Amino acid sequence: MMCLTLALPLRADDRQQQLQQIMDKVGPSVVTVQFTMKMRGGGQLGSMMGEQERQVSMLGVIVRADGLVLVPGNEIDPPEQSIGGRSGGGSVSFDKPEDYGVTLADGKEYRAKLLGKDEEMDLAFLQIESQEPLVLPALQFSPDAQPQIAQEVVVIGMHPKAYGFARKFKITRVNSLLEKPCAMATTEDVLNGYLGGPVASFDGQVLGIIGLRPVTEEGGGGGGGMGGIGRLARMFLGSTPGGPEPTLFPYDLLSDMITNPPKSGSKKPWIGVMGMQALTKELAETLGIPKPGGVILGEVLADSPAAVAGLRSGDILTQYNDKPVEISKDEEVAKFGMALRRLGVGAEVAFTYWRDENGAYASKTATVTLGESPPTQADMEEKDQSEVGMKVKDVTYELLQRRKLPATTKGAVVTTVERAGWAGLGGLKRGDIVQKIDDVEVKSVEELEARLKEAKAAKKGEMVFFVLRDDKTEFVHVETEWAPKGKE
Amino acid sequence: MNSPAHSPLRLFRGALRRALPLLLMPALCLLAQGSDEAAPAGTLGVEAGLEARIQQARDRVYPALVNIQPVRDEYVGGKKVQRTATGSGVIFDTQGHAVTNYHVAGKAKKLIVTLSNKEKIHADLVGGDPWTDIAVIKLRIEEYKGTEAIRPAAFGRSALLVEGDFVMAMGSPLALARSISFGVVSCRDRALGSDMELEDFQRTGSFNTWIQTDAAINPGNSGGPMVNLAGEVVGINARGNSGANNIGFAIPIDIVKEVIDQILKTGTVTRSWIGAEWQPIDQFEEHFQVSGGRGVLLGHVIPGGPAAKAGLQPGDILLTYDGAPVSARFTEQLPDLEKRIADTPVGKEVSLHVLRGGTETELTLTTIRLEEGAGEDYECKAWEFTVKGITSEMARDLKLEAPKGVLVTGSQAAGDARKAGLDNGDVLLEVGGKPVGSLEEFIGAYEQFVDEKRAKVLIKILKSARTQRLVVLEAEYEKKSDEKRPEEAGTEGKEN
């Protein structure tokens, strides 16, 4: 006991110095990002919340001297979220902020624009705007430093606004090394205020930053697998939520993005396969395939790039562009999806694959041109038809695939119905796809709006909607107030 | 479900569907020998007090009232378990036939019946009809040890009921046998919608409206008689609502009688199907230029079905079916139309008059047989999971292109199937390289591999009936040879 007590102050002095050096080195790169987020509720539950504004502040890191700032993506441009049950529930959507405020450690303030977001890593990039060229204190990563298991590290974080965004730090250890979907180290005890923060070793090397571990989805995915935004893009990662946890993203995961940050609106590459499965040792043996390593396709979506190239469900991809697909565990399938996506929209990918031909596997080749990820239902703009008390969206390929409807299905999908509105009273329901009004076809929201306009101009007191509900058609009689009084 | 924002009807329907399995009650019938003759009310004496009339009516049905304890196999958690319940029923002829609900006795492998004089007799299932939720059983009257003769109950006519008529519900609410509750007909023709399910995929109630009553109907009353003051059975109590007060439903006896006749003749009920879904014409009359309460609106045509083949389209107004005019202005009239179509002989060429765009057209369709909605269950004991055959109806619900494969309905925790990654809702397409077209083919392949004690079986599945996936099932045959694990051995009791 005596010795220990004596030894501690000495070591603490050393460490005090080390920590001070780290803070001095890393601290100036840590910035405060602030913006206003507008939320709008939809549906029965959502309409109760109406429109709300929220001030968001978060920690960011300058990663390039020209003003590129990396921030956690979870609160930047979040996807529409559904709340409550399938019927009677609702959704919350978020308006994109016009701009973001960035405050440097020395108090200097800038405006910044959102460049884009990497959905997989859930990281966003902001570009600070300035008239003159910027030379900002960018974080100096140590490219060769790899996190080691049990390594002691320092994480720099930030207090909330109430404490003036004061910087803080935490000493922790790398508690495991993950391979899913790519090399990451976890430091699970790092939570509030450290998300996005830099991580340094005690000898001053910057190892990476704290992000949220990507949610990998297990093969199969199931019927409901195509839910939120970006899920189509995610689908070809194979895909079951494990829940995101704070994780150290080492520099080698970030370097590509820093050089070439993701751009909003830039199209995500898409192959159009749902539910990929690894060719495990066991499956290879059972199928009589010489060696493990490959990806078995679960569902090739109609008209997708994979389908166009002739790939089918059950095909086993073993090579792409002459590189072996070394995937022999389901947890690694996501890696393959990421590798493909890096090739970009328009890239031609030459696959070698096995196809089951009456019980024997034959080796074949196919060239897939990566397409653009089709828009999801969440990307569609919700149009208010207030006179009949409902909101509608255009139907997307993603919705039709999710509901297993023919890809040729046209119409406008009802996203919100006011219970006591004319549409609601007539019996229209959320999820109905309106295909005709008064026997005239409705192929889009635009056409639906035109039909309603005509009906109003003609002072129609009633309309007959023809809708697709689940997968069955039905007529719905909707009264309006447009008819002159007395003639109802 | 208790959200005040819900309309009362929705709330009610939702609760009803959930409450469905609860309702089993004993029914009792008086001697009628199949005669439909209602005893004239006058014979009971106009001067008799209400209580005396109730008691007279009771005496005519009470001796035929039975409590039914079915023993059946259920497929739970990946294995077949034996379960029991309590229901009600009523004897309707001197040979000892009794009617009850399908959900009481329709799948029973053993039936223990207790008469209202407390005598116990075994019974055998004669046949059942899930579409109307009716089953017929036959008491082994040779086992009867009672001294008084078994007296069947008489059937009345449900068509004559009007709101306000006094009725009794007899049966075994909460397994309390020989109970009577009393009330009125609250509504003689309640439409409960066509989306009710008896079990997964098995729709029910499409061919009848319901007699709603405030006579208490509780779980255990299912299958029991609804009795009028003349002492006639006018309905079979089948549904209650656990979320409401005094809202119970009986199947009208008029349709029950037809079902009984068919079951006694053939053991089953044969119906026709045309693959069309109808809507009441009411609010659409002006739009589709029909008047005079004629016709019914075609809302949906099932692809590939007889209606589709005949060229019927959504928006057609059906004016006549098989030569007779058709009319359904209100939802309550739809079950009648459904029943008329169902009653057409299977394979009959039927002529239809439809109004399309204001012009009358004649079309011809050929009916096909209405299948049961749910397939047979099967336990794969060696691989520790259960499956169900896939019917056309299930294939449509699962959105499969055609009926194929078998559906996984459960897998045991830490069992071979679970370890291989099989889950509820997966569809098995191929087992050990053999395509599985039907439950029979599956059983054939399964039994062969089990006989061979095949250690590794490659299975091709559609995960969640959607995405293809290959799994390798590693079977351990040794651990479950013969002796059951103790917790599996017992018969589980379940109070309905």
Image (spheres, coloured by chain):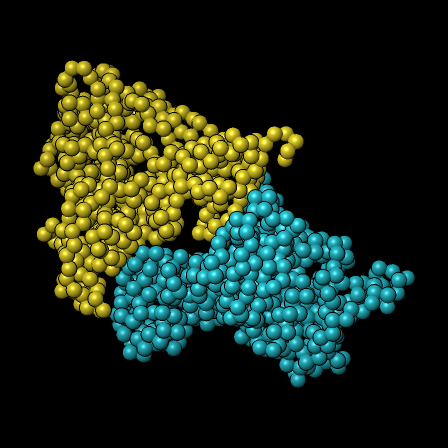
Chain colours: A yellow, B cyan
Q: Is residue B20 above or below residue A402?
A: below
Q: Is residue A78 above or below residue B313?
A: above
The image shows residue B52 at horizontal and vertical percentages of 85, 63
The image shows residue A304 at horizontal and vertical percentages of 26, 49
Report the residue at 60% width, 44% height from top: B286
* Relative side of B348 to B428, left or right: right
Report the residue at 14% width, 38% height from top: A252
User: In this rendering, does residue B264 appear at all?
Assistant: yes
The image shows residue A139 at horizontal and vertical percentages of 15, 27
Q: Nearer the viewer, residue B468 or A205?
A: B468
Q: Quick one: which residue is furthest to the bottom in this view?
A: B142
Which quadrant holds the N terminus of chain A?
A: top left
Which quadrant holds the C terminus of chain A?
A: top right
Classify residue A52 by image quadrant: top left
Q: Nearer the viewer, residue A290 or A320?
A: A320
* Relative side of B219 to A118, left or right: right
Q: Is residue B206 above or below residue A405?
A: below
The image shows residue B361 at horizontal and vertical percentages of 53, 56
Report the residue at 20% width, 31% height from top: A198
User: In this rendering, does residue B338 appear at all?
Assistant: no
Classify residue B51 by image quadrant: bottom right
Report the residue at 36% width, 62% height from top: B427
